[in-house]
Image: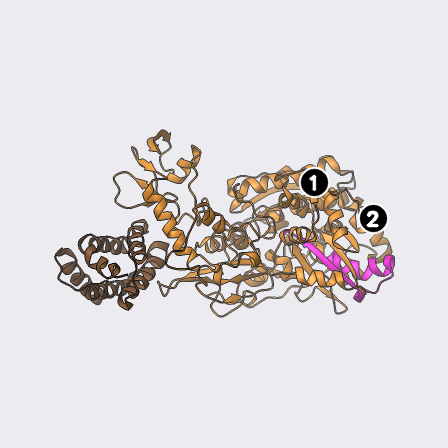
Amino acid sequence: MASITINGKTIKVKNGTTILSAATSIGIRIPTLCFIEEINEIGFCRICVVEVEGEQDLVSSCNTEIKNGMVIETDSKKVIESRTNTLQLLAGKHRFDCWKCPKDGMCEFYDILKEYDILFEEFGPGIGRKDELIIGTGISMDQTKCILCKKCVAVCSEVVTANVLKFRDDDGMNPFVSPTIGLNFDETGCIFCGQCVKVCPTGTLFETDHIGRVNAMIRDPKKLVVVQIAPSVKTAIGEEFGYEIGTPIKEVEGKMFKALKLLGFDQITDVGWGADLTVLEEGTELINRLQNGGKLPLFTSCCPAWVRYAELYEPEYLENLSTTKSPHIAQGSLIKHYYAPKYLNKKPEEVYVVSIMPCTAKKYEIDCPGHEVDDIRDVDAVITVRELAKMIKRKGLDFKNLEDYVPESPLAKFTGAGVIFGAAGGVTEGALRTVSELLDNKPLEKLNYKFTRGSDLRDSKGVIKETTIKIGGNKLNIAVVHGGAAIKEMFKRLKTGKKKYHFIEFMECPGGCVNGGGMPLVRDLPMHEVIKKRTEALHRYDSEDLPLRKSHENPSVLKAYEEFLVKPNSEEAHKYCHTHFTQKEYRNE
Amino acid sequence: MTTESRDVNNLFEKWVLDADTKLSELDLVKNIKTYLESQHPEICGKCTPCRDGVVKIEKLLDKYIDGTATLDTLSEFEKLTYNLRASRCSVGLDIGKNLEVVLENNYNVLYKPVKEY
């Protein structure tokens, strides 16, 4: 223990803590721009500087460990002046077109400038360090707004482990952050998970805009626009309209559907339905591979970022991937080829499908080869939760006072297994509920597979959870892997070949879709807390509010099989609900 | 440290440490600028006060050379110099300390062109 004095208050803290965490523990806020706990503690931005008695220079509080007897001032004149000056320097190289900034009011940099009343005395607001716009199908980068905090670089290398974004300081006076110089994101090893978009304190990194596309679709009178909404979106859409994180889903669900109706979508469906279908397809695939000696372990293929990771970095494992399309693509293809012709009297080419997703990689996924049937793309546009909130606000809807609405479409009926897809471990849990009942031929007693759950600090970097389950006389080794670092670790284990796995669920974002790159931004809570709250909301919805919790009990999915797909993994199912994967080239330099 | 920058550093220390520099204001400003430019290869670009501050200081010195310096220029120069104390490594800190000595010893020289405005 060490005793230190912060702003005249003497406290005792553990050895090894930083000044920043010591100050936070007694409620003194020190502003930061480049700090992420445990991931980015580099002291680049120099906003968090404090004055330490006896030291000539100001020290950065985020990466300076406390020493016994330290006397620290966090708001002396020297400190405030230094912060103001540093902010002025940063602002001098940042383009201020805030009204059209994709950050949309959640800009940390803007807020801190406001807090310190930054004036421009000698130099006006800047025009940006570099004026390059790097595009990509999932995420894009506008370098005029970069303030070189290096958060995205840290997340890309530590959390995602893709090492695409790099800090390029060959010329120390004009450094910049970019993927491989001269290439757009699609040509690099970027997997479009969007974690960098979430940590960016300015609008430098942003999801590629699809709002314009969707608005054009809605205005087109000849076409029928069908919207499908992912289960994890419901845990977070309320946050954009003043609800707390982890608000029970039933409170916002009805309002959200009403808002979609008012936005002008013709039909509202729920990806929970597609998830149920995926469980049946993937579960049957697992059973087939177990009984007929197919390639094991079976990898899930619901997460497009993870699929791209496998295609880029682990091509020798592509055969292990389940060929089932991800839920929203499978549902999109069925909306166009089964639901619209049969129930709405529309031809597939007269239908637009828009997915509302917590994910930026889904924007990339819809353009992938293999996600089309008879030359018609399965899904036409993907908007993130933030974009949906923007559309609702722009439409002028008072979200909190909307009345509840229940969509009539049969494709909006889902079970609990489909809902928990949104959280890490959910795919496994949903699949196990179905597979064990199909193999054991008796109703399942315990529906909650506890091993898939739980959240702690490690979750913000990724975790591996594994267990052995006895199903139908087989002992199955099952693993749940989420977070890029964990995926890398899992492949190390797979390559040593010590343990034989049967089923592995991979999710690129730590915590699964609830922590996806398209989710609303949360600034005052650490990542693992957010994951925990949103996951709890999903699980509570599954266990308390839904009568059906197993995918193979979903009546409308069964009806679709009866009327169209015959049975899981049939020829028709392969045509509409399965895809293929190919190795992809990339350059990471 | 490159040989060139070491030479300039020595030169700088020579006339900076001497409080009664007989340099004219233009020469002083030009000397400071040469010194700052010689430090460019050392700057790593990682922290804001040093990376962006040095460039701004050079722009301010350009105003002296152009003869357009005002009182604001001088106060901005002072602020940026003291802000270098918040740098991450000794490159920025050293530049800051050297410039502080300049301000201490030659404030009147830097103030002279300002008075005319």
In the rendered structure, which amino acid carries the disc numbered 1?
A: Ile
In the rendered structure, which amino acid carries the disc numbered 2?
A: Glu
| Residue A496 position (above or below residue A249) | below
Whether residue A448 can be seen here = no
Dividing the picture into quadrants, the one containing residue A405 is top right
**Label 1, label 2: how many angstroms apart (C-alpha)?**
19 Å
Q: What element carries label 1?
A: helix
Chain under callout 2: A
Chain B shown in which color?
brown
Q: Residues at marks 1 and 2, common chain?
A: yes
Mark 1 and 2 residues: CB-CB less than 8 Å, in contact? no
Residue A408's tag is 2
Q: What element carries label 2?
A: loop
Q: Tell me residue A272's x, y (percent).
A: 73, 48
Question: How many residues crowd mark 1 within 10 Å: few (<14), some (14–19), many (20+)?
Answer: many
Where are the magenta residues, as a range?
A330-358
Left or right position of A309 against A576: left
Chain A shown in which color?
orange
Residue at the (76%, 55%) spot, across then down: A264
Residue B106's tag is none
- Residue A499 or A135: which is nearer the viewer? A135
- Residue A588 or A411: which is nearer the viewer? A411
Residue A249's tag is 1
Question: How many residues crowd mark 2 within 10 Å: few (<14), some (14–19), many (20+)?
Answer: few
Left or right position of B34 against A388: left
Whether residue A406 can be seen here = yes
Q: Main secondary structure of the magenta part?
A: helix
Does the stretch in magenta take in A340? yes
Residue at the (49%, 70%) spot, across then down: A182
Q: In which quarter of the image is the N terminus of chain B?
A: bottom left
Q: Tell me residue A569's x, y (percent).
A: 77, 57
